[in-house]
Amino acid sequence: VSSILPSAVNELIEVLSKLPGVGPKMASRLAFYLLQKGKDDINQITDAILGITQSLRQCQKCGLIAENDLCPICQSQTRNEHQICVVEDSLDVVAFERANSYQGVYHVLGGVLSPIDGIGPEQLRIEQLMARLVEHQECEIILALNPSLEGEATADYLKDEIMKVNSSAVVTQIARGLPMGSDVEYADPTTLVRALEGRKEF
Amino acid sequence: VSSILPSAVNELIEVLSKLPGVGPKMASRLAFYLLQKGKDDINQITDAILGITQSLRQCQKCGLIAENDLCPICQSQTRNEHQICVVEDSLDVVAFERANSYQGVYHVLGGVLSPIDGIGPEQLRIEQLMARLVEHQECEIILALNPSLEGEATADYLKDEIMKVNSSAVVTQIARGLPMGSDVEYADPTTLVRALEGRKEF
């Protein structure tokens, strides 16, 4: 950002550099890329950004970002409502759906517990999850939070809460282990420990 | 991009993933980052993008992106007009100005010769550079193009053209060598050859 550039360009660079994963260098490049574009291309981008400010909400059941009160998955008659996969955010649901093998439903927490960032149980969609569990006495809750410290702590917390509300629920967690295509040689120690713990008869 | 997400979100991800340096993963993250933002933040971003579509032009003299017919540098009375630093684009000017030591003026070519991409001399601001050289019989042209194959080829071409128009002009090129803070050990062979060629008495 420099005083020799037009203020509109400096402002754009400043705004872009606040986006996650976009540093000042990339912000400059993006700004000059946009400068080379015509008004139509620019309007396409701004229209797309403004498009998400309109009529989007969270699915009232699972919390997935949705156009209507219920997301397509919760609306579907073919999904197994007795299997609820708990994830951190909507993109995790997209990842599971892309894998195209899970037939249950989801619950989007909206993050993980993180006291440092001021995120306690009230900031997440935990109460809504418990409400769903009361409805379905017999169900499996699949915990699919990210394998981070916060994710694991949140999983522990959820397990306790679920047991309080519905002691007949089965709580499972997706496996930790070596991702496909990876190398044992380069795997981190924690992953190897988890992979060993999770070993199965072959 | 998935059918379970609202179409507005899918569209935004698609548009963002076309930006340079933004892959599909980063586009998804950016889209969900924007989804969490309020209307004010979103409007700030779109306003900043739309801001550059208004009243920006190239400096009539040097080609730098500018608000007026002349950029602040070409308007300045204190810059040495007999020293013209030729760069590829406006961001290169910003880099030199940040270094805060050059007192001459600039000429922004708008790229480098690249026959494969259909960029010949007519696509660059070469004619405008020659016009400036006719005005100043005694001058130094400092070639500061990127040290790439195309940059070097463009520098060779420019040197020939400059000599045709103004044989009393002095054409120089900024030094190639080891960047500050780098390691001889990790320097690529071409850089080392250039650094050797450019050695000076110590």
Image (cartoon, coloured by chain):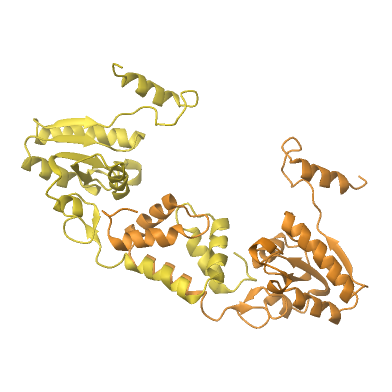
Chain colours: A yellow, B orange
Q: Can I make out residue B200 in this image?
A: yes
Q: How far from the left and from the top, in percent, is residue A91?
A: 32, 48
Q: Nearer the viewer, residue B13 or A132?
A: B13
Would residue A162 be found to the left or right of residue A109 on screen?
A: left
Q: Residue placed at 46% from the left, 52% from the top?
A: B23
Q: Is residue A66 above or below residue A173?
A: below
Q: How far from the left and from the top, in percent, is residue A27?
A: 53, 60
Q: Residue placed at 72% from the left, 42% from the top?
A: B182
Q: Can I make out residue A61 in this image?
A: no
Quarter residue B79 falls in: bottom right
Q: Is residue A185 above or below residue A159?
A: above
Would residue B45 be found to the left or right of residue A165 on screen?
A: right
Quarter residue A177 falls in: top left
Q: Is residue A151 above or below residue A17?
A: above
In which quadrant of the rendered image does the C terminus of chain B lie?
A: top right
Q: Nearer the viewer, residue A157 or B19?
A: B19
In which quadrant of the rendered image does the N terminus of chain B lie?
A: bottom left
Q: Nearer the viewer, residue B164 or B61?
A: B164
Would residue B176 be found to the left or right of residue B23 on screen?
A: right
Q: How far from the left and from the top, in percent, is residue B155?
A: 79, 62
Q: Is residue A26 above or below residue A9?
A: above
Q: Residue placed at 11% from the left, 44% from the top?
A: A132
